[in-house]
Image: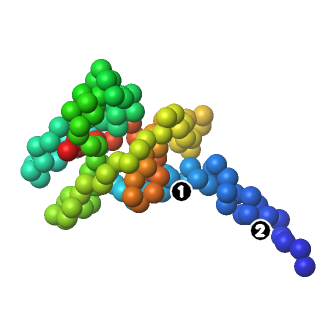
Amino acid sequence: MGTTRSERAAARYAGSALAEANRARAVGVELGALLEADTETLRVNGYGQPVTTLDALWAAGPGGDNDAGRQIDEGREPYLVCGEALSQGMHALLPVWDIGIEKTKVATGKRFGSREYITVVTGRGDALLAPDTLILWR
């Protein structure tokens, strides 16, 4: 017996760009990374290291003329700060292995609305995160 239309659709979706984007969005939500607005929460928990945003890291490179570029030039490594782990007193830092070279525009579900995200490669998989995600440098 042949496959059903829904089975064929599921098979096509499984390897599609949309499936990859949705998986990365789910990883991003699961990480619960702190945003720039949460900097004070980070400081209250005893982290005094320099911080920037993911957007600054995306715009920087070696010799980049912004705070993230200077952190790279000084040999520091970028980390995400996972909010739930931080609130439970656990190890909250997750190394950023790499970032995407292009921002990804994702529909918000509102009529004609969209938001830009940046792909971050971590040990937990690729994650789509907001540009104002907090990056801690060590």
Circle 1 packing at 10 Å, graded few (<14), some (14-19), many (20+), is some
- Image quadrant occupied by the N terminus: bottom right
Q: Circle 2 is placed at which residue position?
A: 7
Q: In the image, what residue occupies the spot 63% across and 50% down?
A: 18
User: What is the x, y in percent for residue 20?
Assistant: 58, 53
Q: Considering only order in the chain, which callout, 1 or 2, is on the residue closer to the N terminus?
A: 2
Left/right placement of residue 2 relative to residue 60 reads right
- Image quadrant occupied by the C terminus: top left
Left/right placement of residue 97 relative to residue 67 reads right
Give, as a three-letter code, the residue at label 1: Arg
Camera-nearest residue between 113 and 20: 20
Give, as a three-letter code, the residue at label 2: Glu
Q: Secondary structure at mark 1?
A: helix
Q: Circle 1 is placed at which residue position?
A: 23
User: What is the x, y in percent for residue 115?
Assistant: 49, 36
Look at the picture and state if 65 lies above or below 124: above
Circle 2 packing at 10 Å, graded few (<14), some (14-19), many (20+), is few
User: What is the x, y in percent for residue 2?
Assistant: 89, 74
Residue 113 - label: none
Camera-nearest residue between 99 and 16: 99
Look at the picture and state if 26 lies above or below 129: below
Residue found at the far top of this picture: 65
Q: In the image, what residue occupies the spot 74% across and 58% down?
A: 12
Q: In the image, what residue occupies the spot 40% across and 53% down?
A: 122
Callouts 2 and 1 close, C-beta under 8 Å = no
Quarter location, residue 77: top left
Q: In the image, what residue occupies the spot 39% across and 58% down?
A: 123
Residue 26 shows in this picture: yes
Look at the picture and state if 87 lies above or below 137: below
Q: Secondary structure at mark 2?
A: helix
Q: CA distance from mark 2 to mark 1?
A: 19 Å
